Image: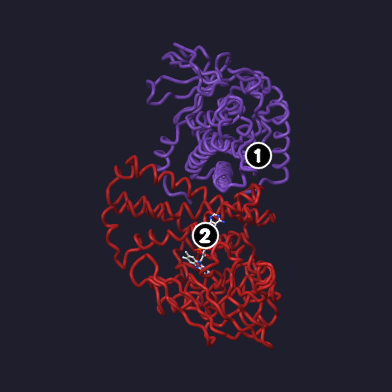
Chain colours: A red, B purple
Amino acid sequence: MDLKFSVEDQQFREEARDWLNANVFKERRPHGGEAMRQYDLAWQRCQYEGGWAGVSWPKEYGGMGLGLTRQLIWYEEYARANAPDNHLCFVGLNHGGPTIIAHGSEQQKKEHLRPILAGDKIWCQGFSEPNAGSDLAALKTRAVIEGDELVVTGSKIWTSHGHLSDMQELLVRTDPDAPKHKGISWVIFDMKTPGLELRPIEIMTAPNHTHFVQCFYDEARVPLKNVVGKVNDGWSVAMSTLGFERGTAQIKDQIRYAFLVEEMIERARERYGDAFVKNDEFGARLAQLRADMAAARAMTYMVVSRAQHNVSPAMASLMRAMVGEVQQRVRRLAFDIIGADGLENPEDDDWVYFYLRTYSTTIAAGTSQIQRNIIGERVLGLPRSR
Amino acid sequence: MDLLPSAEQQQIIDTIKDFLVNEASVDRLREFSAIGNPDFELWPQLGELGFLGLGLPEDKGGVGLSAGEEMLVFQQFGYHLLSPAIFGIVLGARIAASAGEVELRDELLSGTMRVGLANSRGLAGGPRDYHLFEADEADVILLIEESNAALYPRDAFEQIARVNATDAVLVLERATLSNAARPRAEVPVKVDNVHARALMLMGAYAVGIGEGARDLAIEYAKVREQFGKPIGFFQAIKHMCADMAIRSEAALCQASFASLVIDEGSPDTNFHAVASKIVACETAIKNAADCVQVHGAFGFTAEANVHHYLKRAHVADLIWGSLREQRERILTFPTPA
Ligand SMILES: Cc1cc2nc3c(=O)[nH]c(=O)nc-3n(C[C@H](O)[C@H](O)[C@H](O)COP(=O)(O)OP(=O)(O)OC[C@H]3O[C@@H](n4cnc5c(N)ncnc54)[C@H](O)[C@@H]3O)c2cc1C
């Protein structure tokens, strides 16, 4: 056990901090639409041009080729500098890109990786379907091979930022007769392909907030060379993508939330005085969150430590399950602290918006229940339910 | 940065685990008798193996390892529900060493002394009223408070009265610290971060209790069958077990972090020690409660070991300030780095 970072790591930290302090966008990130897209791309481009994009991506694809520890340090400094979360770049940087790095052909790597890092292309994730959520392998969107093309017909849903995206990582069924995990392929899909229609879906945060879309594919044609990995081997390709999401991608969020708890304590003190913070109800909740956030950070360090020792990736679901729920408690407390102000939902204040937003942290990317199935079965060795 | 034990640390863990599995299986608490425990017989062996002075510098009679190793070992002590008198010995030796009481220190490190714990009864008693744990035959009694840490002779306490302990395998007394009490050794808690270290180690001990309850529940969930299936097949039980694992992971990670911070002498030492005690005690109590539920009626009996974990979790919580008091404290610290 060791908390010390090497001299080189510390040097990296200082350089990262300096660069971030000088370059972080100061303007507020727009909540939606083309403005948000332009903002996220510009900030990604800025990181790329500064040489800071893709800390753990291989050098040959424009990344920095550094290990997970540096990734952790980068995210810590990123959160400390209050750098904006460019959520629109998340799928490209954390699923699509890493999947192509792991399973893609040379041609696919050449064509797709740099635009993700450089802030030229936004990727979205087309996995879930109306009838395939937690049971992702039940997906039915069909892709029929015709010559050197795939012809896609069906529907995806909950595609975050689908309406603002250029590319999509798409899971399709290429063999309807094979067992359900066997006949799936992982495809690079261009969102400009004819035959694709989008239906925006409003989310609960406020009227007219669109976060995700439903995608309808009507004989949309995709070059066969856009299949990543082998045809019908998409399930194992997809599982490695979800692994990225469940592993390290949360570091930044977790650190941000730790800061948020501190901010809440300050805000509550300023607003209502010290007695309020010490009030049994709020005091106990704030205190427990302070302790839990410290633990969540330690868990993040453990995830990085385990990854370095190649210990079972399923263990990362321990952190994920904990962090998603702590985030909800943090935002709920923030909401309770502002009291009657919580009945107002102004555009220029985030506390209500983010309170409502955290109802998704126990649903997206594997619900808490699915996380617990994974922990029970793969970590603790309890009998499988299916 | 690496939060996992090193190869050497793993060796220490394996050694203490082996020792405790052979010498202190939790079944001993059932077999020994309804009241009391045989753990004092282990102290000389633990002394010989070096586990009592693990984190003390060599020039102070110890093994010269860090708070990290101490944390890992106390985690195992908790896992086997070792008598909390072990805190009296290990922390007592540190206090004696810091106070320059070399003879007392070495006697403690040899494991031949009986050491009790004094713990404030808080709002339940007056300012000088204490509970004494495992102190009926104690040579010295450890008392750690927010300002001082000291070892007192038993006769420093008055009006000693034996009470039935909720955790019945521990000997519990009420007592009042006499006005004339003179410690055999005393240091301000700032010396060596004794107070933070005590909280951190109690956190580690509680991590062990929570893991013990977790493992007992999982084991049972794999073998107990109802409706033709192991009960761990049912999600209600599976998810309860997963919850125990999630809590235990949080508690262990924070305990590891807190122990490393102490060694660095970081200004956040107190913050992380308190955070560790909060998360670990909450984990220990909740895991033990869930462990009862997973066992059904068997969990409600004294024939199962389950109730020992629950009761010891409450002991760990109440020593050196319960969740309520620690939550009050954690809000007083500045933002950690
Ligand atoms: C904000 C947000 C963004 C998202 N973005 C994307 C995206 O970009 N791309 C994409 O493909 N998907 C996305 N999703 C979809 C997400 O992956 C799914 O919502 C998730 O996998 C759950 O599926 P579902 O919503 O169909 O719920 P269901 O699977 O229908 O689950 C409903 C309830 O049943 C429970 N349940 C289901 N099966 C079990 C079981 N075996 N055991 C116990 N309980 C069970 C669930 O836990 C849940 O409580 C997003 C979701 C959200 C909320």
| Chain letter behind tag 2 | A
Tell me which residue sits at (71%, 38%) in the image: B12
The answer to whether A180 appears left or right of B127 in the picture is right
Quick one: B201 or A214, which is closer to the camera? Answer: A214
Please provide percent x and percent y for residue B333. 42, 43
Q: Which residue is mark 2?
A: A76
Quick one: A262 or A239, which is closer to the camera? Answer: A239
Q: Which residue is mark 1?
A: B219
Above or below: residue A19 compared with residue A312:
below
Quick one: B24 or B203, which is closer to the camera? Answer: B24
Looking at the picture, which amino acid does disc 2 mark? Glu
Give residue A114's quadrant in the image: bottom right
The answer to whether B201 appears left or right of A21 in the picture is right
Which residue is the extreme one toward the front? B227
Please provide percent x and percent y for residue B240. 55, 44
Above or below: residue B60 compared with residue B133:
below
Secondary element at tag 1: helix
